[in-house]
Image (cartoon, coloured by chain):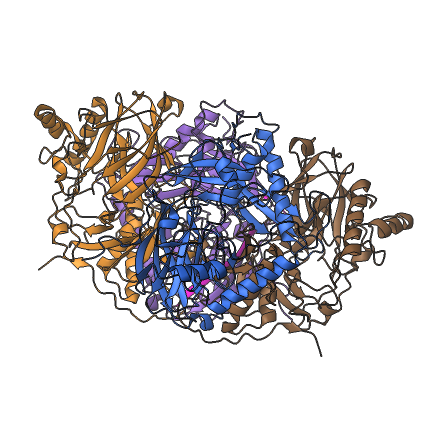
Chain colours: A blue, B brown, C purple, D orange
Amino acid sequence: MGLTEIRTAIKVDLKRPADQQSLLHNRWHPDVPFAAKVKDGEIVKIECVDWTGGQIGNNDSADDMKNIDLTKIHYLSGPFEVENAEPGDVLLVEIQDVQPFQEQPWGFTGVFDKNNGGGFLDEIYPEAAKAIWDFEGIFCSSRHLPHIRFPGLIHPGIMGCAPSPEILAEWNRREAELISTTKLERIVAQPPQPKNVHAGSASDEIKEKVGKEGARTIPGRPEHGGNCDIKNLSRGSKTFLPVHVPGAKFSVGDLHFSQGDGEISFCGAIEMAGVITLKLSVMKNGMKDLDMKSPLFLPGPVEPHYGPSRYLTFEGFSVDEKGVQHYLDATVAYRQATLRCIEYLRRYGYSDYQVYLMLSCAPIQGHVGGLVDIPNACMTLGLPMDIFDFDISPIGGTPKKLDMGSCAVVSK
Amino acid sequence: MGLTEIRTAIKVDLKRPADQQSLLHNRWHPDVPFAAKVKDGEIVKIECVDWTGGQIGNNDSADDMKNIDLTKIHYLSGPFEVENAEPGDVLLVEIQDVQPFQEQPWGFTGVFDKNNGGGFLDEIYPEAAKAIWDFEGIFCSSRHLPHIRFPGLIHPGIMGCAPSPEILAEWNRREAELISTTKLERIVAQPPQPKNVHAGSASDEIKEKVGKEGARTIPGRPEHGGNCDIKNLSRGSKTFLPVHVPGAKFSVGDLHFSQGDGEISFCGAIEMAGVITLKLSVMKNGMKDLDMKSPLFLPGPVEPHYGPSRYLTFEGFSVDEKGVQHYLDATVAYRQATLRCIEYLRRYGYSDYQVYLMLSCAPIQGHVGGLVDIPNACMTLGLPMDIFDFDISPIGGTPKKLDMGSCAVVSK
Amino acid sequence: MGLTEIRTAIKVDLKRPADQQSLLHNRWHPDVPFAAKVKDGEIVKIECVDWTGGQIGNNDSADDMKNIDLTKIHYLSGPFEVENAEPGDVLLVEIQDVQPFQEQPWGFTGVFDKNNGGGFLDEIYPEAAKAIWDFEGIFCSSRHLPHIRFPGLIHPGIMGCAPSPEILAEWNRREAELISTTKLERIVAQPPQPKNVHAGSASDEIKEKVGKEGARTIPGRPEHGGNCDIKNLSRGSKTFLPVHVPGAKFSVGDLHFSQGDGEISFCGAIEMAGVITLKLSVMKNGMKDLDMKSPLFLPGPVEPHYGPSRYLTFEGFSVDEKGVQHYLDATVAYRQATLRCIEYLRRYGYSDYQVYLMLSCAPIQGHVGGLVDIPNACMTLGLPMDIFDFDISPIGGTPKKLDMGSCAVVSK
Amino acid sequence: MGLTEIRTAIKVDLKRPADQQSLLHNRWHPDVPFAAKVKDGEIVKIECVDWTGGQIGNNDSADDMKNIDLTKIHYLSGPFEVENAEPGDVLLVEIQDVQPFQEQPWGFTGVFDKNNGGGFLDEIYPEAAKAIWDFEGIFCSSRHLPHIRFPGLIHPGIMGCAPSPEILAEWNRREAELISTTKLERIVAQPPQPKNVHAGSASDEIKEKVGKEGARTIPGRPEHGGNCDIKNLSRGSKTFLPVHVPGAKFSVGDLHFSQGDGEISFCGAIEMAGVITLKLSVMKNGMKDLDMKSPLFLPGPVEPHYGPSRYLTFEGFSVDEKGVQHYLDATVAYRQATLRCIEYLRRYGYSDYQVYLMLSCAPIQGHVGGLVDIPNACMTLGLPMDIFDFDISPIGGTPKKLDMGSCAVVSK
């Protein structure tokens, strides 16, 4: 009578390679076979590996970060067959809980090498770096980032339903177009990649198809959400996801103990393995009823909150670090705001890479200021002062520098 | 003994044209003469006209919005000579209060015509439109936007100190470069504009110089802040501004009763005339001490707050409405988020222009989601459900449409 | 077209004695004549004197506090005739704004002499004391309480509709009973007091009746609210008041710039004169529909907020300072919590009377902990650390004492 | 390298009777032997049984609640020997996490029979009743209280260090005095009770002594905290506890998934078994340094928050339900506020006992209003409207009643 134990719908084995586990996959494709089934309205637990499938170790070297194999990521748990779900429906995902595994109470934040992954500031900070975080209940701290401690707003970086063949084709079309027309001298998108494809329990034939056509999990995409990296999709949130294939084929993964707005270092959240507890419900014909083209959501009521006056806030404008004026470019503006924060925190003894790592994973608020005052976009970055165990307020005179140690760096 | 009345350092006359009032100006230039003087640490009241200098009327036609003369804006109060302030210092601006004039308890939000000002969504919504807001204490409502009511987070859109000649030259250089190199078929920046220049009490000679060289007040700029349109610079906030000229030459204006993140319709906040109460203090050598290149600030402790779970949140990605994939473009992504919200609110009977106006001025939260998952930037737009007097939650089935009247439109 | 100016329904004259102004009154009685009229749904401004009618001066002596004439208080503005309101209805009061008069930007907090008014801690602190507060926009600070500064949660201490004759009789019955049966050696209630009665524009005959029967305004009472001193009845709040007489006879007064939970020193809020902007609407038959015996309310969305972890919180139990065990007495428990806070803040140099004054008016949170664990009630007092300009956290070793000056005291 | 797993310092066995487990105890006494040891600054997990030691079942009858044996409660985990802790020190307890056992995801809220335990409203609601709650991640819901669902603010009801012999003697003296002098016709305190005493691993001799002298765990007490039932002592909180015996002898228990301010039904929180993760640190000579007579604490930054305007708030005054006027009695006033809420929620179909149960455990805010306006204390009770899945706002006309089923009641 009443609830006894919540069913674990997918289990993972942290000691076995992720690509040998048939309930995981690492590409978006309608033909990835169902890994498990849930009833409409059921609450289940789902275990997840970390997004890299265990490539990063709890140690003091960033060599693993430098040499990461990005063709493997992200390993997702699923896809789930959701009873009653059909194309045109909306899948309501209520996150009841997310937690690290009890026996693995740590996670990592990384900066990739500019030539293998890169990140938001890779033009300025091209080296790989890493910080390991210890989880002490709902709090975390890092030996690589002294004097910082905060509670996690734990969330999955990725949730989404599989694309239909038509949507998948559109993804591949438009991303290929970007690749072929870009004038940037960098990788601008990741086309399908047969190498290291993992299609769950698929036959070799299906697996080959998934490898050729399947969308990479790296970007989020408007039609289904996916890797949107929204830190507020945490405990208590309700997300409304479009359904494109029968049974929904819902997948989840890329658990983050914490993330800052923008996840700027790319491997920027505190990446972890763990368990997510979800309630999945179907809203029939929801896409039409809600006129829905992209997911929408309601955050949960239990986010950490510090009071608005406790956010030291930096402004960024769309003039880049070389003095070039960009036109209403919010991305450039937000990059400038992050640089302003790095410059500011030097006064306490942190290295630039330490702050880059911290900004990626601490609960910073990245807000739009003005986006219409030509030619300058203005973005703000709010840094919660209460995550530091010393006073970082600009009021009160020159501080003395503290011993800040070092983040993990690559071996030379 | 004790405080009696706070001095009003600048008074304006709402019945006289703004360009005939010598304590106002509408260009950034180091040679605009001081309009008033304040002591280091003094609290003063400063009266401000609305940013257009009274071009918009409290009526039901958007013709004034369509025909606005943008060479006149923004009319700022100042510049102030701040005792002790010298280049390299930081001016700490503490906003003690901001209020509309008691005898003019109304303001306006506008959409400009695409060919005269434009805005964030002008490709889709090219017509001019307008909403008039009534101020009822700290709340506002509009006959042009039924069923919506919220408290203002009243703030100045513009605060800043005058540029030095060198900084002004740099502004003109880089913005001219953008104008000369852009491939966009639209106005991308506003170069100096002698027409309708207002240089306060300047001599004709100085005025001519200001007209030729003076920076337009439209964009915010990293070196001094200016028109950053950050809604959180409200009562209780502390802003740290770089000082570039002796006496600081601090100016303020563009008061907003409320604004949404992005101020997307350009004339997007609830624009008003009113009084701001400020405390101005000098932090000697602050720029070097804080390693400051752009302003930073601490918001105040009294922002309206609704609880995180009361924000209906829309996701936008950097794929535009024509299906074109952009590379990590947060501006495109935020535009998509605003479109998702417009599409959603149609189900209750609002017109697209009504929602466009509402999103510009209601306290919506525009957040960075992910900015590194190539090629898609993800941005979110959080709409506080509690500003509506009916339930806009996606849960609960198809709603019946309400009579939403109309916003003010242009005459045909 | 649209809102021009909000009507001021009652004006006061700060230079004339309160008892000579016919739109004020200082007793609750159904026969006090209407002072003004409002329409159902109208928004009006109402001017109010301070609760003492100007007995306290902006100076550094507490002699006026010691010698205050309590037969005169509180001077309320009203009563209002509300169109359509009849017994059994509910009057919905929406507070749109509350502000001090521009020309009187100061207020006072007082401790009464134990023998003339007393207060929550008068057994321990029997002397009169006073602090004068300067209003700087939405913030206040006091020369008598250095290093403290906070924004006001401005509110009226008193709102209510006149009692019916039956309700008034019941009040007089039960309070007389308490007076006649109490074993406490102190004044436990204030019966009707003809001395200094002010019944607005009443005839002499009515005035005499009001003096003989009229309820003192000092306590709040369940049937109508009145002097409930709830700090959250501030801007944006909606209060639902029972209506007992035709036209409602709504009165308001006792404006507070700020108050702590409990208003412990009795003259404990920051008392001020000012203007309140209200919307008054009638809910027909609301008392029955809501099964309402006492007012209920919804606070507004713009309270100052500091983040829960910024409240240093003291515990109090129902064992008094003499070691006597009381049975589940929340009043004793809260008194103990206030004493714990006074003891704690001594370490920074504040005098006990200074803290007593501060606790009365700063936005402290007084919460119920446990009220059932016999014999001890547990109450908590949360002190927002951010109102101090130095760090009061218990972590970090012994602080050095600061020069805290003195509050205003009585002359010897 | 780095954190691997957090040590579990005390394990319990939910299948074995609590009084047979040597790491538990149910009286406060300095002679209860140490159950475990922790280092200064160590983080440990501690398992706890529910406060009754398993007397209440997951079923639909309240008979177990009616017949509960209160001589057994509360079973606490400990006491702990904390390295370095000596009398006069302060023990800093940082709660890192609290969770139910994964295999027992449910808890209970009960109303005791008036003659066996009673509660805050037992004069009016004398029967026993019960609600079982299912834990779905951080949320809970109850088949006995339909249409209600909320996240838990999970916390221990009890934390404290053992009393010294002198303090214990004082407790016994003053509580005996209350018992001998009270004129109330009810049990006002619980003297030492040899029956069912559990003194951990104590010898028979010590156990007998503990039975004769040991303080009941029911009330919190000012000298050490204990059963203070403060809902905010949750994850992220820091509590400062006085140390009275060598090694501190710290104990913890009475875990609550959620509790309302006051825990009004006595068995009022959602009682559960589970695991608490704590960091224990010693502040040498902290009692003198902080002038500490009672515990103080800082809440954590992750409390559920709903926005102030989402709290429907009831007022209570110190006039009891029989019309008797009490003198500034906050307990009476809070009881009235709870009755107002019960009366209000009847309109939706809830029974009085259902609301009584709900008020005991949902995150309601019990605040002090005014405590000085003789003779009426005013207390408020804020009910978060967002825990209901329908609209309980007083605005919007008479609602239709819902099918609310029933709470568990006693068999007749």
The residue sitting at the front extreme is A205
Q: Nearer the viewer, residue B175 or C276?
A: B175
Residue C228 in picture, x, y percent from top left: 40, 51
Residue C164 in picture, x, y percent from top left: 36, 63
Query: What's the magenta bit mostly, secondary-structure-wise?
Result: strand
Q: Nearer the viewer, residue C328 or B255?
A: B255
* In magenta stretch: residue C102: yes
User: Measured along the vertical axis of the image, is residue A338 above or below residue A237?
Assistant: above
Q: Is residue A201 left or right of residue C358?
A: left
Q: Quadrant of the N terminus of chain B?
A: top right
Residue B315 in picture, x, y percent from top left: 52, 59
User: Would residue A41 be visible to someone looking at this image?
Assistant: yes
The residue sitting at the right extreme is B205
State the residue at coordinates (72%, 54%). Answer: A375
Q: Which residues are magenta?
A: C88-106
The residue sitting at the bottom extreme is B412
* In magenta stretch: residue A187: no
Q: Nearer the viewer, residue C53 or C152?
A: C152
User: Measured along the vertical axis of the image, is residue D387 above or below residue D101?
Assistant: below
User: Measured along the vertical axis of the image, is residue A234 above or below residue D232?
Assistant: below
User: Would residue B135 be visible to someone looking at this image?
Assistant: no
Residue D99 in picture, x, y percent from top left: 29, 44
Q: Quadrant of the C terminus of chain B?
A: bottom right
State the residue at coordinates (48%, 28%). Answer: C350
State the residue at coordinates (34%, 34%). Answer: C336
Q: How many marks?
A: 0
Q: Nearer the viewer, residue C262 or C167?
A: C262
